[in-house]
Amino acid sequence: MNLDEATNQINQKIAQSPGLNARVKFNFGDDGIVFVDTTQSPPVVNHDDADADVTLTCALSTFAGFLNGSQDPNIAFMMGKLKVAGSMGLALKLNALLEG
């Protein structure tokens, strides 16, 4: 999975979840950033490094596992493969939204 594929997947998942009303940053390290602002209508999805309510940091390969169901985000968090900065409650909502 590359950054464009991740961006498209995130865009599709966010479209299925109206009312999230948050700013989320997915930080994939050297592979880039996907920023989602659902406080606007329609939601904005881009590659800006903007302030977010929650930032999820992981490798693109780990994120791909979340989307296809081969990697549990909770286990990834406990193993240090996923780092969360900001609202843990929002991170848990995203967990349910992103799982494959």
Image (tube, rainbow, N blue to C red):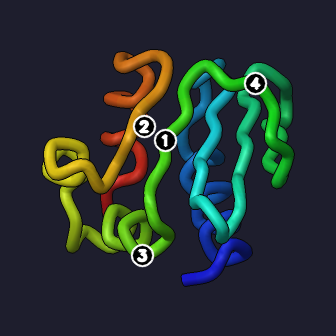
Mark-to-mark CA distance, 4 and 1: 12 Å
The reply to whether dot 2 and dot 1 touch (C-beta < 8 Å) is yes
Mark-to-mark CA distance, 3 and 1: 14 Å
The reply to whether dot 2 and dot 3 touch (C-beta < 8 Å) is no
Q: Earlier in the sequence, mark 4 or mark 1?
A: 4
Q: Is residue 24 above or below residue 21?
A: below
Q: Which numbered tag is attached to residue 39?
A: none
Q: Answer with left or right where residue 70 lies relative to residue 97.
A: left
Q: Earlier in the sequence, mark 4 or mark 2?
A: 4
The reply to whether dot 4 and dot 3 touch (C-beta < 8 Å) is no
Q: Residues within 10 Å of mark 4 (few under 14, many from 20)?
A: few
Name the residue carrying label 1: 56
Amino acid type at circle 1 is: Leu
Q: Answer with left or right where residue 79 lies relative to residue 22.
A: left
Q: Nearer the viewer, mark 2 or mark 1?
A: 1
Mark-to-mark CA distance, 4 and 2: 17 Å
